[in-house]
Image (cartoon, coloured by chain):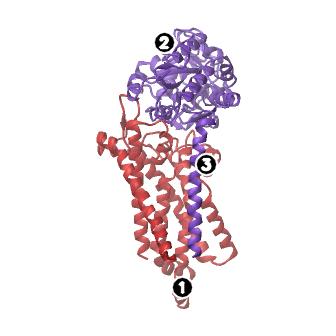
């Protein structure tokens, strides 16, 4: 006879199995798609700065996009760091339990839920004219503008995880420190941070991972030039944005090169997320 | 016991769904009118949207068009998932050889690529061939460059950097533009060449005509190329371009159709750029629908093949061509229509022509 628990177990098992199948299927099909590109260019694909789709002269390299992706994400994390750190301390410790903290916490969660296209649109119509007005460059596009919008997008991620980590620090420890005459500053820097350190660090890793793969808002602001940017205010392109832009018309070697870039992005974000997971386990 | 009952109900429901579905299908084949699917170029999208909708309204033949880009259109035809495809660049011999069967090209209208710019207070900018090349090669970087001033003696050009905007996605618009640039300058042909996407020496990319147009409109000092239908509809400022006769011509429906007055080859595979007609706007081009010469493939019915050809015969005729003009494309010249009709006569189903002589 069929038994309830068995059925439930089977269903759960099948559902989990499907995740493995989907993930490995994706990797396999990506790998299959990259074969022509890696056959033709080999490892040079990663180091070449060419992106020439003209017939007869076809040559593809991923370096400009790897650089663009890493640079925009690093800019994002550098800007995000002080803001997310201060906000998480504010919500998770200094004003913990107060109305203002829960209000700001809600706002942070709301920011996390805004679709990326909305950030892009805001960046295009508001942020970009500021960049032009401040005289950074003529058109407002570029890796810095893209990094800036990415920072705003990843702040909520870094903040909410950091808040959880800060809240997880045991009260006993803090109370003990206070009873020994420690000031609030002492408690924050000598009790909370050492305890929540790896968790907070992980939140930035995850935010970084998200910044790497972000597409729409970046496409709208980076300028989409397939070259290595010469300065922070130069235009460039990221891996995700390049794929979004070019997959429609692509075929043959170009399609294979785009798939190869997708695989590279998959591997990089996978590594970053894996690193985050490893650190979170160390708590 | 309850769980089993629920399970049974679900199973019954599922099998019922399956049954009703297959029932519908067999019914469809007999009674439901034919539906046609096409996909491809975005350049003629406003025209196709209008024409397809009108045709569906008049004939009850359901037509769907996916504006997924010329490359996508060719790929869809190759995969035989559409009844016909659409492309702004005709297939070269190599591309045709990659298809499993011979195809034909049917031109549907003429569009142009305009050079749009954003300079406050500057109207009627003129660009010589050399100016155009130098700007898009990054040799002229300032609006008050001596060479631009020489072409535009009456205009007050500001001391401002030029921001070049091009397409970031692959596009037939880019193909027409780069084909023209290759024709007027050997250096461009060698270093940049022609293609649906290029390795640009200078500038930044934006996605689609709306993306490029938006970027230009938002950026003082910007210049870029966009489809004429889009520029006309959006009233964007565009430059007059020096044509092969040395005249500066603004893009308009008249000057665009003038570019197709010359000889048209029997397969209509010709780029209209740099036309020798003295009144022609030089960056113009046909856009095509492509279909297999033998329509019996992938299990298509004869009715479907007949409707495909019927629709294609309609889109090149007056009613549809008037629609093209309403959405700012130039109509096909008489000669092109005649040639296209001849081509349609060669389309067969099981070796039998679909249009009776």
Mark 2, other Cα within 10 Å: few <14 / some 14–19 / many ≥20: few
Q: Considering the numbered disc 3 on the image, is that residue within a helix, a strand or a loop? A: helix
Question: Which chain is displayed in purple in the rendered image?
Answer: B
Q: Position of residue B22 (x, y in %)?
A: 56, 47
Residue A212 spot, x, y in % from top left: 47, 54
Chain A appears in which tint?
red
Labels 1 & 3 near each other (Cβ < 8 A): no
Q: Chain of mark 1?
A: A
Badge 1 or badge 3: first in the primary sequence: 3
Chain ID of residue with mark 3: A
Is residue B72 placed above or below A7 in the rendered structure?
above
Residue A61, by quadrant, is: top left
Q: Are marks 2 and 3 in contact (CB under 8 Å)?
A: no
Circle 3 sits on which residue? Answer: A123
Question: In front here: A236 or A116?
Answer: A116
* Mark 3 residue crowding within 10 angstroms, few (<14) / some (14–19) / many (20+): many
Mark 2 — residue? B266
- Please indicate, yes or no, whether residue A216 appears anywhere in the rendered image: yes
Q: Secondary structure at mark 1?
A: helix
Q: State the residue in front, A44 or B34.
A: B34
Q: Is residue B311 above or below residue A189?
A: above
Q: Residue at x 55, y 48 (%)?
A: A216
| Outermost bottom residue | A179
Query: Is the residue marked by circle 1 packed among few (<14), some (14-19), or many (20+) residues within 10 Å?
Result: some
- The mark found on residue A174 in the picture is 1
Q: Residue B354 at what x, y percent from top left?
A: 54, 20
Number of marks in picture: 3
Front in this rendered view, residue B51 or B121: B51
Q: Are marks 2 and 3 on the same chain?
A: no
- The CA distance from mark 1 to mark 2 is 87 Å
For residue A68, which numbered disc appears in the image? none
For image coordinates 62% across by 77% down, the residue present is A96
């Amino acid at each position: 006879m069929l038994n309830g628990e068995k059925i439930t177990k089977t269903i759960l098992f099948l559902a989990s199995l499907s995740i493995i199948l989907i993930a490995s299927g994706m990797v396999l099909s990506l790998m299959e798609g990259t074969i022509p590109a890696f056959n033709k260019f080999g490892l040079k694909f990663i180091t070449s700065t060419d992106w020439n789709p003209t017939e007869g002269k076809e040559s593809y390299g991923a370096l400009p996009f790897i650089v663009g992706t890493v640079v925009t994400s690093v800019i994002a994390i550098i800007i995000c760091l002080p803001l997310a750190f201060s906000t998480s301390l504010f919500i998770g410790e200094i004003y913990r339990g107060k109305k203002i903290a829960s209000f700001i916490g809600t706002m942070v969660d709301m920011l996390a839920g805004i679709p990326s296209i909305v950030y892009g649109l805001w960046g295009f119509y508001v942020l970009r004219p500021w960049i032009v007005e401040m005289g950074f460059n003529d058109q407002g596009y570029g890796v810095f503008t893209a990094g800036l919008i990415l920072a705003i997008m990843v702040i909520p991620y870094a903040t909410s995880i950091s808040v959880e980590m800060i809240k997880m620090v045991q009260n006993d420890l803090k109370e003990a420190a206070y009873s020994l005459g420690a000031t609030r500053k002492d408690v924050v820097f000598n009790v909370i941070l050492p305890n929540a350190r790896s968790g907070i660090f992980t939140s930035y890793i995850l935010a970084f991972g998200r910044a790497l793969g972000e597409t729409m808002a970046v496409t709208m602001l980076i300028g989409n030039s397939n070259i290595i940017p010469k300065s922070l205010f130069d235009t460039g392109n990221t891996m995700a944005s390049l794929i979004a832009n070019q997959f429609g018309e692509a075929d043959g070697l170009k399609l294979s090169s785009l798939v190869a870039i997708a695989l590279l992005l998959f591997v990089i974000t996978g590594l970053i997320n894996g690193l985050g997971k490893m650190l979170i386990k160390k708590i | 016991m309850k769980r089993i009952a629920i399970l049974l109900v679900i199973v019954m429901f599922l099998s019922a769904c399956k049954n009703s579905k297959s029932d519908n299908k067999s019914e469809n084949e007999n009674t439901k009118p034919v539906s046609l699917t096409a996909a491809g170029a975005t350049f003629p999208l406003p025209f196709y949207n209008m024409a397809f909708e009108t045709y569906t309204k008049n004939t009850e033949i359901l037509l769907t068009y996916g504006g997924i880009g010329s490359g996508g259109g060719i790929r869809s035809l190759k995969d035989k998932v559409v009844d016909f495809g659409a492309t702004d660049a005709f297939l070269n011999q190599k591309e045709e050889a990659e298809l499993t069967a011979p195809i034909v090209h049917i031109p549907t209208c003429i569009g142009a690529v305009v050079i749009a710019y954003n300079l406050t207070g500057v109207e009627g900018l003129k660009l010589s061939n050399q100016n155009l090349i130098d700007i898009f090669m990054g040799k002229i970087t300032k609006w008050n460059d001596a060479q631009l001033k020489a072409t535009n003696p009456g205009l007050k050009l500001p001391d401002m950097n030029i921001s070049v905007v091009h397409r970031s996605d692959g596009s037939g618009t880019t193909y027409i533009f780069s084909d023209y640039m290759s024709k007027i300058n050997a250096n461009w042909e060698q270093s940049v060449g022609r293609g649906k996407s290029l390795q640009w020496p200078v500038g930044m990319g934006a996605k689609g005509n709306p993306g490029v147009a938006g970027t230009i409109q938002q950026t003082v000092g910007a210049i870029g190329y966009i489809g004429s239908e889009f520029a006309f509809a959006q009233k964007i400022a565009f430059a007059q371009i020096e044509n092969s006769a040395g005249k500066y011509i603004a893009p308009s429906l008249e000057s665009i159709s003038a570019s197709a007055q010359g000889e048209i080859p029997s397969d209509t595979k010709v780029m209209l750029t740099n036309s020798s007609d003295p009144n022609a706007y030089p960056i113009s081009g046909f856009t095509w629908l492509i279909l297999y010469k033998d329509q019996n493939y992938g299990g298509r019915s004869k009715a479907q093949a007949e409707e495909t050809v019927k629709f294609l015969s309609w889109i090149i005729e007056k009613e549809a061509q008037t629609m093209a003009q309403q959405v700012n494309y130039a109509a096909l010249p008489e000669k092109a229509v005649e040639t296209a009709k001849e081509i349609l006569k060669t389309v067969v189903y099981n070796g039998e022509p679909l249009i009776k002589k």
